[in-house]
Every structure is written in C-alpha cells, then in structure tokens.
Amino acid sequence: MRFNNFCASFISLFFWIESGDGSDAGAEVKTLLYNMLDSGSGIPWKSLLLYLCKDADTELALKKAHAALTGIS
C-alpha cells in the first residue's frame, strides 16, 4: 500500500464516516479509497465528488453531481 504526503493530507480530512471516537476505521477506509483513486499524482477530486453524489433520489443525485462539477450549488 502506497502512503505519501498526499495520502496523509487526505487521511487528515474529517469525513462523515468517522465516529470521532478515536478508532482507526475511518482512516482505513480513507486509505483504501485513496489507493483506489490515486493515479500517481494525487486524487482526482472531481471523480471522488461524483462517487459521493449518489442518492436514492435521481434528481437530487444529478443536482449534487452538477454542483460538484461546476462549483455552483
């Protein structure tokens, strides 16, 4: 598993998947996510945002994706 400064910066971000109780589960999930998406020059942030836009409501998912790609909410 590759671990570098980009990965360390990514892992330091707080995600909703973390419980805040000090467990390493959130860091492990983020490390896995980073290693899946890293193309050698860091995370493709737009791709990550699109992965996180999924929603049971199709219209809401499209609105999220549009906001992620354009920066307009």
Image: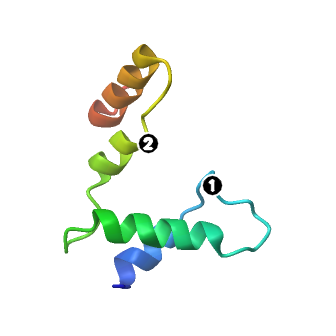
For the residues labelled 1 and 2, the Cα–Cα distance comes to 12 Å
Residue 61 image-quadrant placement: top left
Residue found farthest to the front: 56
Q: Position of residue 16 (x, y in %)?
A: 63, 51
- Whether residue 29 is situated above or below residue 8 in the rendered picture: above
- Whether residue 17 is situated above or below residue 43 in the rendered picture: above
The residue singled out by tag 1 in the image is 17
Q: Amino acid at mark 1?
A: Ile
The residue singled out by tag 2 in the image is 52
Residue 4 image-quadrant placement: bottom left
Q: Is residue 49 left or right of residue 55?
A: left
Q: Is residue 51 left or right of residue 27?
A: left
Q: Mark on residue 60?
A: none
Question: The N terminus appears in which quarter of the rendering?
Answer: bottom left
How many marks do you count on the picture? 2
- Asked if one can make out residue 73 in the rendered structure from this viewpoint, the answer is no
Q: Amino acid at mark 2?
A: Leu
- Asked if one can make out residue 66 in the rendered structure from this viewpoint, the answer is yes
Q: Position of residue 17 (x, y in %)?
A: 63, 54
- Whether residue 36 is situated above or below residue 16 in the rendered picture: below
